[in-house]
């Protein structure tokens, strides 16, 4: 690492020569406001002009997010010229931004308000242009409101960087410029994955999840048996919504809050994850033993499934027919659980708490038989808890309900991190193929947060691969399409890092987390992943096939994995060139 000597506000510092001025200042303890930079302090557009600083010898003010440091550089953040320019930039942005802050879904997390306070900007100093506005709420997962858009370009970069599909871009020119899919089409009419990565980086409320809290409220008011089930990744992040540090486990308090919100039962989707492993693991073994289509590719991520149907329908035969864990669990809740408790399935309303906006689309797919009635993101659950007056810090630690669907294994927990589905499946596949448990429990060689990883499982004689984010996964998928893939099993997650980094998780933005680590964007996924791996280690049962409730489910109801009833309830199919999203909400 080459170091350079620089001065910031007259003080001497040594920093890495690869940094931008914005990155270097943040590392040295200075906070420069910025709206377009989000990726580790780097930015390819420098569009917001909020991070302007004065650099000795430079012609005019410099956008610190794109300006590289160099030896002997002298940087002034607080010069009158820089301060006034930053304030003017923010006031110009405010002039064309929809003002209803109290009704804004980003209220409390708005970076524009945070930056305006930092620079002392005033509303009303400039009069904004009459730009045409678009409110797109047709797609099930994401809402787009150009009245709030500040043209920072973050969403454009994120879609390109994470998924490689560039759904969004700048449309029109001059005062009529907006961020939109081509020709200002709805998200419903373009090949959008609905992953929500764009939502995660939007600094204002221009992109938000399609809230379904009202559906849950209506079901409770109607006297339905409202059963809630939470995804593994939710527990790794929910505490962040209540001021806790990233990496704080939230399982017990989350369950306590759900009990107090009045749900009929509070279940863990880890049960559904264990069930998925039984079906998906046996499906893989069946393919290996009977000359089936290989590699088998996981189907847990609805964002990946959307991408596959749009861009790689040729690999549908490779994709597991298993529904995702929460959809499986919804199906079992409305059949097995309902029958055991003599409840009419029509009186059951299943709510999934997910880290993912694409799950909102998934539940509406006609192939899913209305297994789940509403999907709330981690952020939506936090809103429900806050509006109910529940004090998170004073909540006790409580357990999930133990009622037929209550037990889960450590294998189910790690589904929320990239590589977790693979590892969980291998734990069970090893047992089925060898007749004994894997003595090390952990398959270390499939762990990690790199975008693409591969491993050879010598004990099973197979090669496997893991990818998260479609930009990373596309190479693996292309090999499958061309018949060149050397793998037996491939795990793909739509979001980089897996569900811990889903589009419905709490926002992780340095400007709103001044007390967190300087390198928070480098570490937050590791910290959330550590929560899940730690819970796996604490579980007495760490393999899906040893889950007693799963064993009872097969004994009393399903018969065996891949049985006729299992195929009917737990498996589905996917569509080449599928129809667009249903019109309307």
Image (cartoon, rainbow, N blue to C red):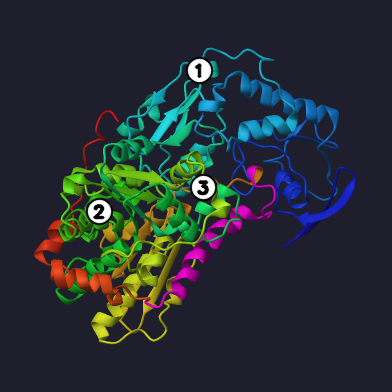
The relative height of residue 30 versus residue 5 in the rendered view (above or below) is: above
| Residue lying at 54% horizontally and 21% vertically, measured from the top left | 98
| Residue lying at 25% horizontally and 62% vertically, measured from the top left | 483
User: Residue 255 occupies which quadrant of the picture?
Assistant: bottom left
Q: In terms of secondary structure, where does tag 2 sit? A: helix
Q: In terms of secondary structure, where does tag 1 sit? A: helix
The residue that disc 2 covers is 330
Does the rendering let one see residue 295?
no
Q: CA distance from mark 3 to mark 2?
A: 25 Å
Does the rendering let one see residue 50?
yes
From the viewer's perspective, is the residue at label 3 or at label 1 nearer? 3
Residue 389 in percent (x, y) is at 51, 42
- The secondary structure that dominates the magenta segment is helix
**Residue 484 vs residue 241: left or right?**
left
**Residue 446 vs residue 82: left or right?**
left
**If you read the primary sequence from the N terminus, does the residue marked by circle 3 or circle 1 appear first?**
1
Quadrant location of the C terminus?
top left
10 Å crowding of disc 1: few (<14), some (14-19), many (20+): few
**If you read the primary sequence from the N terminus, does the residue marked by circle 3 or circle 2 appear first?**
2
Q: Is residue 1 magenta?
A: no
Residue 224 in percent (x, y) is at 25, 43
**Residue 426 vs residue 386: left or right?**
left
Quadrant location of the N terminus?
bottom right
Residue 506: assigned label:
3
10 Å crowding of disc 2: few (<14), some (14-19), many (20+): many
Q: In terms of secondary structure, where does tag 3 sit? A: loop
Residue 176: assigned label:
1
């Amino acid at each position: 690492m080459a170091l350079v000597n620089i001065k910031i506000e007259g003080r001497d510092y040594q920093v890495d020569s690869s940094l931008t001025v914005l990155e270097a200042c943040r590392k040295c303890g200075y906070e420069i406001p910025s709206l377009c930079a989000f990726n580790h302090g780097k930015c390819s557009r420098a569009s917001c002009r909020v991070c302007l600083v004065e650099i000795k010898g430079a012609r005019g003010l410099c956008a610190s997010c794109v300006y590289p440091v160099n030896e002997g550089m002298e940087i002034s953040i607080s010069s009158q010229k820089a301060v006034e320019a930053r304030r003017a930039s923010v006031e110009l942005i405010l002039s064309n931004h929809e003002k209803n802050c109290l009704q804004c879904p980003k209220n409390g997390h708005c970076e524009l308000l945070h930056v305006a306070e930092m620079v002392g900007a005033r509303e009303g100093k400039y009069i904004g242009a009459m730009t045409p506005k678009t409110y797109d709420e047709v797609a099930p997962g994401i809402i787009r409101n150009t009245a709030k858009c500040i043209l920072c370009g973050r969403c454009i970069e994120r879609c390109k960087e994470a998924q490689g599909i560039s759904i969004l871009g700048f449309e029109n020119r001059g005062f009529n410029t907006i961020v939109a899919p081509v020709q200002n089409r709805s998200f419903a009419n373009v090949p959008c994955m609905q992953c929500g990565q764009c939502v995660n980086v939007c600094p204002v409320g221009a992109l938000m999840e399609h809230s379904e809290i009202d559906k849950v409220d209506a079901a409770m008011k109607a006297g339905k048996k409202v059963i809630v089930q939470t995804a593994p990744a939710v527990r790794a992040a929910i505490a962040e919504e209540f001021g806790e540090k990233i990496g704080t486990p939230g399982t017990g308090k989350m369950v306590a809050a759900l009990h107090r919100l009045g749900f009929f039962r509070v279940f863990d989707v880890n049960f559904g994850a264990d069930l998925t492993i039984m079906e998906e693991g046996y499906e893989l073994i069946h393919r290996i033993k009977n000359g089936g289509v290989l590699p088998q590719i996981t189907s847990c991520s609805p964002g990946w499934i959307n991408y596959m149907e749009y861009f790689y329908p040729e690999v549908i035969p490779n994709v597991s027919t298993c529904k995702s864990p929460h959809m499986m669990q919804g199906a079992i809740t409305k059949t097995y659980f309902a029958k055991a408790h003599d409840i009419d399935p029509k009186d059951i309303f299943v709510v999934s708490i997910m880290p993912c906006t694409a799950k909102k689309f998934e539940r509406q797919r006609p192939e899913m038989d209305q297994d789940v009635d509403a999907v709330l993101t981690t952020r939506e659950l936090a809103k429900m808890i806050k509006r109910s007056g529940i004090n998170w810090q004073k909540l006790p630690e409580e357990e999930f309900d133990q009622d037929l669907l209550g037990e889960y294994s450590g294998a189910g927990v790690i589904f929320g991190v990239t590589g977790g589905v693979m590892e969980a499946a291998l734990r069970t596949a090893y047992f089925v193929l060898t007749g004994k448990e894997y003595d090390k429990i952990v398959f270390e060689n499939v762990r990690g947060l790199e975008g693409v990883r591969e491993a050879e499982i010598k004990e099973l004689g197979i090669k496997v691969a893991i990818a998260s984010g479609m930009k990373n996964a596309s190479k693996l998928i292309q090999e499958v399409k061309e018949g060149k893939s050397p793998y037996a099993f491939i795990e793909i997650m739509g979001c980089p890092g897996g569900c811990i980094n889903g589009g419905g998780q709490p926002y992780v933005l340095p400007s709103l987390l001044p007390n967190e680590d300087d390198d928070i964007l480098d570490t937050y996924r590791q910290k959330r992943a550590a929560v899940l791996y730690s819970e796996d280690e604490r579980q007495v049962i760490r393999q899906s096939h040893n889950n007693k409730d799963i064993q009872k489910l097969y004994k009393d109801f399903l018969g065996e994995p891949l049985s006729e009833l299992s195929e009917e309830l737990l498996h589905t199919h996917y569509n080449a060139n599928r129809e667009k999203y249903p019109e309307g909400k």
